[in-house]
Image (tube, helix red, strand yellow):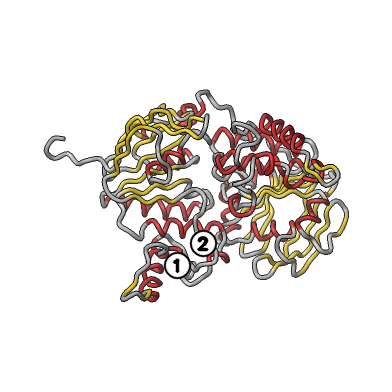
Amino acid sequence: MTAGETSPVLEIRDLTKSFGPVSVLKGVTFSLGPGVILGLAGENGAGKSTLAKCISSQYRPDSGTIRVNGSCFTVPQEFTLIPTLRVYENIFLGRELSRYGFLKKKAMILRAQALLNKVGCTVPPRKMVSDLNVAEKQKIEIAKAFLDRSKLLILDEPTTVLNRMETETLFQILREFREQGGSVIYISHKLEEVRTICDRIVVLRDGVLVADEASGDLSAEEIARRMVGRNLTRIFPPKRPADPGTDEVLRCENVSSGREVLDVSFSLKKGEILGLAGLAGAGRTELAETICGFRRRSGGRIVLNGTAITRPTPDRMLRAGLSYLPEDRQRTAILPDFTLADNLTLSSLSRYTSWGFIREKRCREAAARYMERFRIRAASPDERLGNLSGGNQQKTVIARGLDSSPSVFIFDEPTRGVDVGARGEIYEFIHALAESGVSCLFISSDLEEIIGCCARVLVMREGRIRGELSGDDVNEERIMFLATGVK
């Protein structure tokens, strides 16, 4: 190293990592200097999260070297918060402030408040994590990263559930961190976002590093092409407006649930893809959970396939023909220690039992069919689901919902943590479902996909439906006017 040069914050040489017979990282080599934001892109299963876990010492590489100059903090794709602890307790977990063996609670609360303010989070430090929504949990994970003066931050899908204003707040924080000499590895499937915030972009494909270039030299289309090794066609299928004479499948009449859902009324027609938009905390997920029976309904009426459901429970709604893809996959949708086949057949297990015994062979055969149909990348139906990438876990949950033959499918953030190629597959799947007559309620924080997929959109704010848009009115400006209440 010559005079005036600074040592890299991170050096990786010939890194390899396998899980059983599956090789995940294959000779990855790159370095990262101080004051640089590096974008890490790749399809689901390309090795991004595995690489991040190797850098942060969660995984031990099979071979190769990793040198980190200073401390490193990782904000993972899946939340690590403990729901039975308060916000400030989670922020300081393992790094508590104490004196003479006693916790300095007041000091931790004040410091936590400052960190929450920094990331634009209005959640009180004393609030229980179990009472938070997904976007609030994401902000707390980010706040944890700034507690110590780490030289390297690894952010894995940090903006999946953040709206545009919240994302820009995060970007400003990262720019300030970079100006102070800190370095960032930024993992995201939002390719325009990667180009906006990152100085360099590294692309992995099937565990191999296939690009390491300045962000200005790569368009979003070129990044996507490097990720998948081919040119991508249009990602959104043509929209399918519902015919005015089409039968109504789901109707909500003045539905309420506590203070989160207030007097909501709408209808969903057969074969329609109806969008539900709104900012974080608007009540979209709470409405979905109320319809599906996960939240207690305090008022109103739900009619599914012509039958009023007086006491909706998850099991009753499932048997009535409603499937649900929840927003928080890790907490409420998967059993990571169970096999892929077990997870796929969980909701429709009665179809795979005889005389009270589970027909394991039939479960595996069904799982194999869904693996092929949804291109789920796994060694076999017997692989532990927790070993799969986030996108393959998401496809598994969608396939499970389909296995119960629903007439209505509610998708809450269906492409969360999913790469650009798999997103297109999910959009095509939802479109094909609608063509087959299944009605879809499509909930998303990503306005691009709401606009690209839905011919009709409901917009929520503060627990209420604030407007309905269709046709050319389904655009970002009109949606944001209704979502914010500002004109």
What is the quadrant of residue 13 in the picture?
Answer: top left
Q: Measured from the top left, where is residue 441 in percent x and y?
A: 71, 48
Disc number at residue 319? none
Tell which of 99 and 141 is nearer to you: 99
Residue 479, compared with residue 206, is above or below; it is below
> What's the residue type where badge 1 is placed?
Glu
- State left or right for residue 87 relative to residue 111: right
Outermost residue toward the left in this view:
3
Tell which of 71 and 436 is nearer to you: 71
Callout 1: helix, strand or loop?
helix
Q: Measured from the top left, where is residue 296 in percent x and y?
A: 73, 66
Task: Please say if the residues under marks 1 and 2 sit with CB atoms less than 8 Å apart.
Answer: yes
> What's the residue type where badge 2 is placed?
Ile
Callout 2: helix, strand or loop?
loop
- State left or right for residue 146 relative to residue 482: left
- In the picture of the structure, the residue carrying the numbered disc 1 is 89
Q: Measured from the top left, where is residue 87 in percent x and y?
A: 47, 66
Residue 314, compared with residue 363, is above or below; it is below
Q: Residues within 10 Å of mark 2 (few under 14, many from 20)?
A: some
Is residue 479 in sight in this rendering?
A: no
Q: Residue at x 57, y 47 (%)?
A: 447
Q: CA distance from mark 1 to mark 2?
A: 9 Å
- In the picture of the structure, the residue carrying the numbered disc 2 is 82
Tell me the quarter of the image containing the N terminus.
top left
- State left or right for residue 204 relative to residue 477: left
Q: Measured from the top left, where is residue 420 in percent x and y?
A: 54, 35
Residue 295, compared with residue 468, is above or below; it is below
Q: Residue at x 73, y 46 (%)?
A: 409
Outermost residue toward the top in this view:
230
Tell me the quarter of the image containing the C terminus.
bottom right
